[in-house]
Image: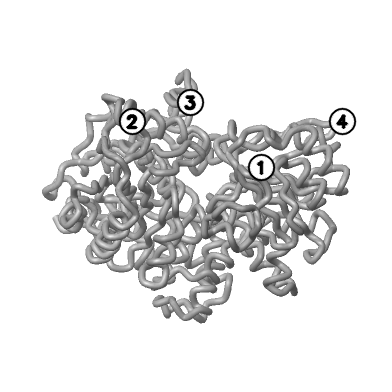
Amino acid sequence: MSSTTKFASESGPAPSVKHTQSFLPGRGAAPSSSDYDTSLSVEVRKYLRTYGLTPPNVESFEVQAERCLKQLEQKATAIDKYLYLSNLRNNHTDLFYRLAMDHMKELTPLVYTPVVGEACIRWSEIYQQPEGLYLSYADKGNLASVIQNWPAQNVEITVVTDGSRILGLGDLGINGMGIPVGKLALYTACAGIRPDLTLPLTLDLGTNNEALWEDPLYMGSKRPKISCEEEREFMDELMAALTQRWPGIVIQFEDFKNPFPSLERYRNTYTCFNDDIQGTGAVILAGVINAVKNSGIPVKDQRAVFYGAGSAGVGVAKQIVEWFVKEGLTEDEARKCFWFVDTKGLITLDRGDKLADHKVYFARDDNNGKQIKELIDIIDEVKPTILMGLSTIGGVFDKQVLNRMAELNKHPIIFPLSNPSANSECTFADAIKYTEGRAVFASGSPFQPTMYQGVLYHAGQGNNMYVFPGIGMGTILSKAVIVTQNMIYASATSLSTALNEDEKKKGLLYPDVSRIREVSVIVTRGVIRAAQKDGVDREITIREFTDEQLDEWIRQRMYDPRKVHDSLEKEVKGLLQNAVSRQ
């Protein structure tokens, strides 16, 4: 992004050219890529000294978008489209975000899931240019110095991964950089966090993926993953170094194989959260709130089977437990509404194996010694109203499973949440077909509408992009010292209220993605209000705002590439007019 076109989300409305005019071309700095924008007027081009370096026609945004979309159409494969958009983002930042905002539904799958999965698998093969910061275990003891090499003077938010559990693809080492890059692009596109104030960060802590050791193109360290103790020491140094350079930075953990230790260790000391646990839990909770309303079954009678018992599944269930408690159940009553299934079957305290710590909370103690392995048998035993999939096993919710859920429920709640789409526990078409159109459905990956008996059904997608941009933006704008559980919970309840009347009529559980900026304002407001209630906010000037005033205040602080262009045009022309008047 051009140094002449910065918008500050942390300290008030976007600064104009006069705030940064010492960096303007002609005043000591070389032009940046955004200064070659073909929508800039001739006057501005001459002032920036880029006149003649671009074709002479001054284009509209619409013409620019048409060209980009035509070029995108010419790319034969999904990964080619991903690379095209990556180059556009790196070399014409404002144009990329104008395009992304206007075509959110079409471009999000190319920028993030599912295509980012292939991009991560092939990251060392398709690498073209730096897009983030890599910190290696070999840098231990010197992390602060390496972090100083990041050129941005200010960073408001970073997404950090060690690549050890990328989506449902496993340990990809430094190839996981595609996740922080894509995630932060969504922070900007969805919630308006300035792109130049974001930091994609990948930790090279080794990998246990031996295929990567043997790959001559792999760009990370070819050594086994470090020990838990070594990782803890490294993370302690990292967290201190990040906040030393950028006090108040929001740190989002992403795709760690075991995300609980870092979250528990740092959540009350640093401004951080984990999207896999908390963001996933929040977005699914929002969908469950609306699904339960649609099902007609009260909270106290809900029974949920979770197929997949990893950290994400447990994080989701714990947030639903919190909602059940707020709806009148005791914590123990709420906890007993859940049955978890892993590779060995139903999780029980007397199963005979040592359970991972995070599985113990939901382990059943009322099975009377009975151990059940197969999903269909568990469904017969439990008679669930809700079936959640977080297993990464594609198609496991087959015809038999879906038929049985439909026999047990008038409106079975079916959530196949695994990404990418090939790992989804069932397709939307199958869920509708095998429940005779009665499924209340949301998935992790996007699915096209499906026709059943002359009726067009629309799939809900429990995409974390509905909440994490608002969590980040709300934390930044409130200047929260920590991210509290109430802030995470507020993101979910705020999202559940964001449906418009048309979306409700379609039976959707989530808003249309094309409205994501509007939805992010609602989520951001909820997060800010929760921070204020918890007393962790430092932006005291907005505490007395009405919701309408707060929404407008949030909108004014959202990066908008259109406003960047208009501000630059206005300010440069003003400078030229002043120069003429002084002559």
Depth check: give the residue in front, 580 or 479.
479
SS of the residue under disc 1: strand
- Identify the residue under disc 4: 453
Calculate the distance from the C-alpha at mark 4 to the C-alpha at mark 1.
23 Å
Question: Identity of the amino acid at label 1?
Answer: Pro
Is the C terminus in the top left, top right, bottom left or bottom right quadrant?
A: bottom left
- Identify the residue under disc 2: 212
Q: Are marks 2 and 1 in contact (CB under 8 Å)?
A: no
Decide which of tag 3 and tag 4 comes sooner along the chain: 3
Q: Is residue 362 above or below residue 509?
A: below
Around disc 4, counting alpha carbons within 10 Å, would you say few (fewer than 14), some (14 to 19), or many (20 or more)? few
Calculate the distance from the C-alpha at mark 1 to the C-alpha at mark 3.
23 Å
Q: Is residue 563 above or below residue 62?
A: below
Q: Residue at x 85, y 42 (%)?
A: 406
SS of the residue under disc 4: loop
Q: Residue at x 72, y 49 (%)?
A: 371
Q: Are marks 4 and 2 in contact (CB under 8 Å)?
A: no
- Identify the residue under disc 3: 78
Q: Is residue 169 above or below residue 492?
A: above
Residue 416's tag is: 1
Left or right, 285 with reference to 33: right
Decide which of tag 4 and tag 1 comes sooner along the chain: 1
Decide which of tag 2 and tag 1 comes sooner along the chain: 2
SS of the residue under disc 3: helix
Q: Are marks 4 and 1 in contact (CB under 8 Å)?
A: no
Calculate the distance from the C-alpha at mark 2 to the C-alpha at mark 3.
23 Å
